[in-house]
Amino acid sequence: MSDLAAPERTASAAPAARPKEPPQPRLSRKHREWLAAALFLLPDCIGLLVFVGIPMVLSVVLSFFQVSGFGSYEWVGLGNYERMLGDPLFWDSMKITGIYVLVLVPVLFVVSLGLGLLVKQNLPGVSIFRTIFFLPYVISLVVVGLLWKFMLDEQIGVVNKAFRSVGLEGESWLGDPDIALYSIIAVFIWVMMGYYMIIFLAGLQEIPREYYEAARIDGAGPWTQFRTITWPLLRPTSFFVLLMSTVAAITGGFELVFVLTEGGPANSTSLAIFYIYQQAFVFGEYGYSAAMGTALVLAMVLVSGVIFKITKGGRFDDGD
Amino acid sequence: MTVDSTRGVPRRRVLAGGAAAAGTAALAGCGLQAKAEGGPMQFWNFYAPQRSDDPALAAQSKWFTDLVAKWNASHKTKIELLYLPPPIYQTGSKLPTAFAAGSGPDIFLASPGDFLRYYNGGILMDLTPHMDKAAVKDYYKDALASRMVDGKVYALPMEVEPLAMYYDVSAWEKAKLSEGDIPTTWDQLLDVGAKLKSPTRAGIVTETKPGYLQNFLWYPWMWQGGGDVLDEKGRPSVDTKAVRQALQLWQDAVRLGITPRVPPAANDLIAAFRGGNAAMWQSGIWQVSSFRAFAPKFEYGLFKLPTPPGGTYKTALGGWSFCANAKGRHPEAAAEFCAWALGTMEEECLDRMVDWCVKAKSDIAPRKSVLERATRAGGYDQWAMKYFKDEVFPGGRAEPRYPPVIYKAMSDALQGAMLAGRSVDSETSRAAQSVEAYVKSYKGAKLV
C-alpha cells in the first residue's frame, strides 16, 4: 500500500510548474509616471513653498499685527487696513503707480513691438542691433540707475548737453516733480524694451512665411499684412507681454526710484512699492507695510484679471 | 544604541536626522541662530575693513581695525568687523532687517535720527555702568544729550560734525567778489548766489533729495529764527514764523535758480568745485579731510551760515555713535567694548579719539579733554579745522533725535515747499498737524 500511494503523495506535494511570468512591478506605469513627475517637481515646489508661499502667508498674517521690528507683536486686527484707507500718502503712491503703469505699459508695448518688427527684417547688421537693444536688460537696475543719474544731471548730464547743443533749454529731469516720474518711465523702457523685443521676435518668427507670400500675391500692402496677419497671430505673445510688463511695472520700478530719486522730489516718484519699502525698512512699520503689500498684490491680481478678460487670455478662438 | 554599518542607518533615524537638520537650517534662516552663545561679536559699520585708494578712507578703516585688534588682544570675547558700504548702512534695509529677524549685530553705529527707534525697541544697552563717571562729564552736553534717557547713556558719540558753507575762491574772484562779500544775512546769501550762478554753475548747493540728511541740513536755518519742531518740553511748535521763513528761504533759492534741484556732479562737492559746477555748498566738517586727500591745492573758503533779520547764529551738530545691542549674543561685552573704546579717561582712549577726530577724519572731538588734547597736538592748526572749532562749533546745537514720523512730516514740508513750489503756509500747517497728531499718541522716551 505504501508503495502504491507514495508516488501520488509525491505528485500532490509538488504542484505542476506554472509558465514563467515577468515579475510584477509594485506600481502601475501610470503611477510610476506620476511619481517621476512628482520627484522632478519636488525641488521647485519646495522652493516655491519656502520662498513664495510661506512668506506670502506670513505677510498676510503680519498685516494684522502692529510690529515694532524689534520683536514686539501686537494684534490690531484690521487696524492696519483702516490706517491704509485713511493714509493720503498711500493713495498718492497708488495714484502714481497707476500713472506709471498706464504710461509705461502701452509705450513699452509699442516700442518693443516696433523693435521686434524692425529686427525681424533682413537688414544689414541686424544681429548687432538686436544685441545692442537687448544689452540694457542684462545690466543690473541699480547700475542702470547710477548711469542715468549722470546722464540726466541738470548741469553736466549728456541729455541736457544734447538739448543745449540744438538751442533748447535743459530740464531738471530728476528734480522737477512734473517730470521726474516720466524720466524714470523712460529709463525703465530703455531697460526693458530689448527683452520684450526678443519675445515679440519669437512670436513673429512663429508666423508662417507663406501667409505673407499669399497676402502679397493678393496685393496686400505692409499695413494690411500687419493688420490682418501679424496682429491677430501675435495675440498670445501680446497677451504675455501685456501681462508681464504690467506686473514688471508695478513691482519693478523700485530699484530705479531708490537710486534715482528716493521717492522725491516732493513724493512725486513714490511708487506704491517704494512707499511700502519705506514704511517697513525706514520707519520700521512692518505690520502696516504688510497690509499695504497685501493690498498691492490684490490690486495686481485684479489688473491681471482685467487684462486676461480683455485679451481673452491670448486665445485665438475667442473662447467660444 | 549603536548603528550597524553593514545594515545601513534605520529609516526612522534618517528621517529624524533630516528633520533636525532642516529645522536647524530653518532657524538659521530665520536669524535665530544669532542668539546662540559663542562666536565673536559682530561690529557692523561703514568704515572697515576696506581697501581703498582714498587715503582718508584707508586711514579710517585702519583706525577701526586697530581698535578691534587692540580689544581682541586683551579680551576673551572677540570682535569681528563687518563692513557695509555707506549707502547700504545709512539708508539701506540691511540693518533694520537684521534687527527685525533677531540677528542684529552686537555693536553698531547709529545716528541721532535712529536713536529713539532703537531705544524704544529695546535694542540699546545702557552703557553707563561700564563708563567712567568722569568721562560722562567730559562729553559736551549737547553731544551726549540726544543719546541719553533718564540720565543714562545709551550711545557714545565718536565725533561731532558741524555744518557751514564752503565756497570756491576762484569762482568768487571771477565774479569779482571778495572776502568782504561773504554774506551774513539770508538776503545777502541769495544776492551772492545769484551773482555766482551760471547755466553750468550752481550758486548755492544743498541737499534736495528727501532723507535725514536734508532735514539735518535745513534745521539750523529754522533754529536761527527761533523756530523748532518741538519745544524744550517736547510740545509741537512747528506752525511758527521761523519755520515758514526757513522753508521760504529754500523755496526762494530754487525758484530763483540759485540752488539746483539736483546737486551737481553726483553730489560730490569736490568734483563740483573743481569742475566749476558749484560756487557755494552747505556741508559739514567731514569735507575738510576730503579736500586734504583729493584736492590739497584747491583753494576753498568757509563761512558760518548767515542769519535771518533778528536771528541768532546756529548750526547743527551731527555725528555717529557706538551702540551695543541689548538683544545680541554678548550684550554686556558689547557695552563694555563701547565704553572701553570711547568712554573712559584712560590715556589710550583719549589718544584714540584724537586720532579719529583729527587724523583719520576731520571732526570736532565730542569730549572736552579730547578736544584740548587734539588742539595741543596741532589737530586744529589748519585754517579750516581752526575755523570750524573756533567759529562754527560754538554756535552749534545737536542734531535732534526725532523719530521717523516727525522726520517724514518735516521732510514732506521741505520737499513740497522747495521742489514742488507749494505754499509755505500750507506745508507748515500740514506738517504741524502731523507732528501734533503723532506726539499725542507717542509712547516712549522723551522726544527731545
Image: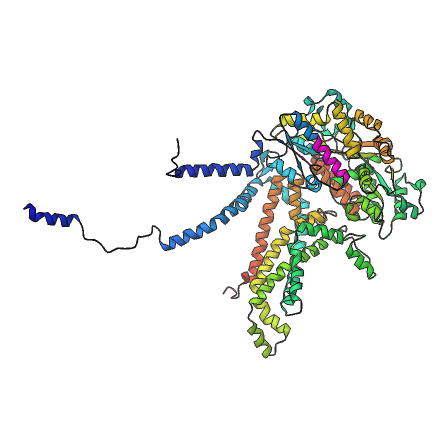
Q: Residue furthest front?
A: B6
Q: Position of residue B224 (x, y in %)?
A: 84, 35
The quadrant where residue B138 appears: top right
Q: Is residue A245 above or below residue B178?
A: below
Q: Is residue A95 visible?
A: no
**Image-based side of A77 in relation to B199, left or right:** left
The front one of B303 and B13 is B13
Q: Is residue B158 magenta?
A: no
Q: Is residue B349 above or below residue A216?
A: above
Q: Is residue B360 visible?
A: yes
The front one of B53 and B325 is B53
Total marks in image = 0
Q: Position of residue B429 (x, y in %)?
A: 76, 41
Q: Position of residue A129 (x, y in %)?
A: 67, 63
The quadrant where residue B344 appears: top right
- Which residues make up the magenta segment? B42-66
Q: Position of residue B282 (x, y in %)?
A: 82, 41
**Image-based side of A195 in relation to B447, left or right:** left
The quadrant where residue B343 appears: top right
